[in-house]
């Protein structure tokens, strides 16, 4: 009886998701527009990385941090901490797994798999670059540091993860779902977190502005790679999944 109830609920969830999914041509058009903008940042990140490799910090970094930290208030403190909280362990992994399970439950099987790939791939790239650059984090003798972290600073892991993982979630919602109030709400909420995470990391004194800029750029590159992987696998695996399937292209 319990198994029948669960199966019925799953079928209803898949049917509701099908009704909310947009057409394939619209999905593909949105996909191409999204990727074109992302791939344009590779050169900018390469240039910034070359400069940061030899410079622990810039005067503009200190100025930006002190300016942001001048807006002190309990509400602003709480907001900045709230924005950064999902990016710390263990909640970062718990949230990612829950989101992947939700995708799978509603019938988006390949989307769930690709979400887990984004969860692993983006932090891995971040660690590799950090180990190469080895830039120290802001010190408490220069700016206020809310919490001392012992890892390297460039690029910001939080910002990269939010762009790579939550950016992918934004992409899925934007490309797969039809226009509706809940689609708009999801896009706004996820977008706010991605936009504000940079200011949050600077305000909390855990990254320089150039760390954040580099993370937005490199995070966009990792997001583009995740998108390529998603579109590549979409035509090869789970092509007949319950919701938003994509039949493999046949030879003419």
Image (cartoon, rainbow, N blue to C red):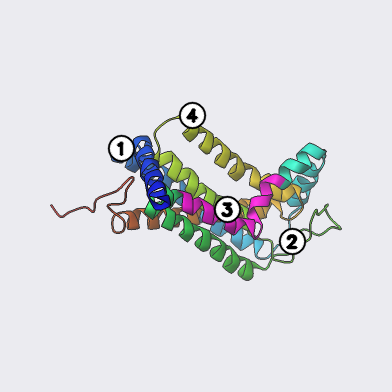
Residue 141's label in the rendered image is none
Left or right position of 47 against 70: left
Disc sitting over residue 95 in the figure: 3
Q: Kindly identify which residue carries mark 4.
A: 181
Name which residue lies at 74% across and 61% down. Answer: 137
Q: Secondary structure at mark 4?
A: helix
Disc 3 versus disc 2: distance between alpha carbons?
A: 26 Å
Query: Outermost residue, left direction?
Result: 252
Measure the alpha-carbon separation of dots 2 and 4.
Answer: 41 Å
In the rendered structure, which disc, 3 or 2, sits on the residue that comes first in sequence? 3
Which quadrant would residue 37 be assigned to in this image? top left
Quarter-of-image position of residue 244? top left
Whichever of labels 2 and 4 marks the residue nearer the N terminus, that label is 2
Q: Position of residue 241 (x, y in %)?
A: 31, 51
Q: CA distance from mark 3 to mark 4?
A: 23 Å
Q: Which of disc 1 and disc 2 is earlier in sequence?
A: 1
Q: Residue shown at 79%/60% (left/top)?
A: 148
The range drawn in magenta is 82-102
Q: Which mark is residue 137?
A: 2
Q: Is residue 139 left or right of residue 113?
A: right
| Label located before the other in sequence (1 or 3) | 1
Residue pointed to by mark 1 = 23
Label 3: few (<14), some (14–19) or many (≥20) C-alpha neighbours in 10 Å:
few
| Residue 71, visible in the rendered structure | no
Q: Are marks 3 and 4 in contact (CB under 8 Å)?
A: no
Is tag 3's residue or tag 4's residue first in the polypeptide sequence? 3
Please give the name of the residue rendered at 73% of the width and 64% of the height, measured from the top-left corner: 136
| Label located before the other in sequence (1 or 4) | 1
- Asked if the stretch drawn in magenta spans residue 37, the answer is no
């Amino acid at each position: 009886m319990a198994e029948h109830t669960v199966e019925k609920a799953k079928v209803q969830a898949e049917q509701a998701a099908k009704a909310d999914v947009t057409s394939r041509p619209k999905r593909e058009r949105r996909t191409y527009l999204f990727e074109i903008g992302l791939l344009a940042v590779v050169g900018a990140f390469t240039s910034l990385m070359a400069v940061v490799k030899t410079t622990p910090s810039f005067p503009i970094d200190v100025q930006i941090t002190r300016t942001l930290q001048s807006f002190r208030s309990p509400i602003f403190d709480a907001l900045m901490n709230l924005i950064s909280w999902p990016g710390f362990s263990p909640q970062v992994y718990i949230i990612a797994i829950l989101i992947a399970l939700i995708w799978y439950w509603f019938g988006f099987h390949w989307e769930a798999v690709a979400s887990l790939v984004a969860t692993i791939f983006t932090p891995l790239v971040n660690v590799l670059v950090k180990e190469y650059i080895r830039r120290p984090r802001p010190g408490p003798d220069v700016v206020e540091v809310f919490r001392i972290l012992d890892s390297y600073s460039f690029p910001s892991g939080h910002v990269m993860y939010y762009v790579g993982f939550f950016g992918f979630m934004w992409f899925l919602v934007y490309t797969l779902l039809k226009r509706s109030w809940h689609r708009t709400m999801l896009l706004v909420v996820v977008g706010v977190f991605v936009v504000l995470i940079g200011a949050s990391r600077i305000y909390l004194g855990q990254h320089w502005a150039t760390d954040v800029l580099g993370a937005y750029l490199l995070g966009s590159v990792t997001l583009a790679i995740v998108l390529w992987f998603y579109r590549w696998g979409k035509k090869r695996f789970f092509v007949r999944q319950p919701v938003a399937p994509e039949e493999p292209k046949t030879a003419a």
